[in-house]
Image: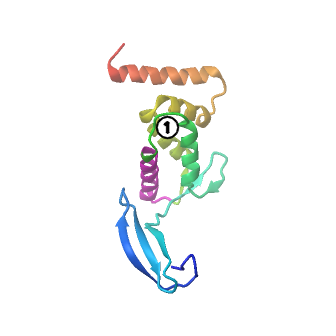
């Protein structure tokens, strides 16, 4: 590891801690040449499949891109950031466990839809309106009605 101050490669680990969630280790390091202290993170590198878009293009999985779509849907909604981070970790784990080289983008979209449906109905409808590409207000209303019907059935109210 190169020191960010002097560029020397000789350092020593001063402290190591497991991060919450157990998916990374935080290490405090000290440069042996200049004494500068800095922090590094060690994470498991997952072999994630390529994402095949609707039009056929392939791209690497982008955690921040997926987070951006979720955050837009959640704008001013009461969903904690920790909940989203945990969901994103579970998506990466599920993708790695598939063992596939490529997966359709619809798989990610469906995972997000399921997550948001459980978290917040407004965020769910926002995401669904973009993901499902509603052509008119009727399709949006049908989705909202289905959501309301499912909620009524789950709560037992007619």
Q: Is residue 125 above or below residue 99?
A: above
Which image quarter holds the C terminus?
A: top left
For image coordinates 47% across by 70% down, the residue present is: 40
Q: How is the image coloured?
A: rainbow
For image coordinates 50% across by 33% down, the residue present is: 77
Crowdedness near tag 1: few (<14), some (14–19) or many (≥20) residues, C-alpha within 10 Å: some
In terms of image quadrants, where is residue 156? top left
Toward the front, the furthest residue is 35
How many numbered marks are there?
Answer: 1
For image coordinates 48% across by 22% down, the residue present is: 146
Q: Is residue 150 above or below residue 90?
A: above
Magenta stretch holds residue 118: no
Tell me which segment is drawn in magenta. 83-100
**Considering depth in this image, is 154 or 36 the residue closer to the camera?**
36
Residue that badge 1 annotates: 113
In percent of width and height, residue 124 lies at: 51, 33
Q: Give left or right: position of 131 versus 86.
A: right
Q: Secondary structure at mark 1?
A: helix
In percent of width and height, residue 44 lies at: 43, 66
For image coordinates 38% across by 76% down, the residue present is: 14
Toward the left, the furthest residue is 156
In percent of width and height, residue 87 lies at: 43, 47
In percent of width and height, residue 45 lies at: 47, 66
Q: Is residue 100 above or below residue 140?
A: below
Question: Chief secondary structure of the magenta span?
Answer: helix
């Amino acid at each position: 590891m190169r020191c960010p101050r002097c560029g020397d490669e000789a350092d020593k680990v001063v402290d190591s801690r497991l991060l919450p969630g157990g998916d990374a280790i935080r290490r405090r390091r000290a440069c042996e040449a200049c004494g500068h202290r800095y922090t590094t993170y060690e994470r498991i590198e997952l072999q994630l499949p390529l994402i095949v878009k609707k039009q056929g293009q392939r791209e690497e999985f982008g955690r921040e891109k997926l987070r951006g779509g979720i955050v837009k849907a959640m704008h001013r909604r009461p969903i904690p950031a920790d909940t989203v981070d945990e969901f994103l970790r579970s998506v990466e784990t599920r993708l790695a466990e598939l063992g596939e080289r490529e997966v359709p983008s619809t798989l990610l979209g469906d995972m997000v839809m399921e997550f948001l449906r459980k978290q917040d109905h407004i965020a769910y409808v926002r995401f669904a309106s973009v993901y499902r590409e509603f052509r008119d207000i009727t399709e949006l209303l049908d989705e909202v009605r289905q959501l309301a019907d499912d909620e009524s059935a789950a709560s037992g109210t007619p």
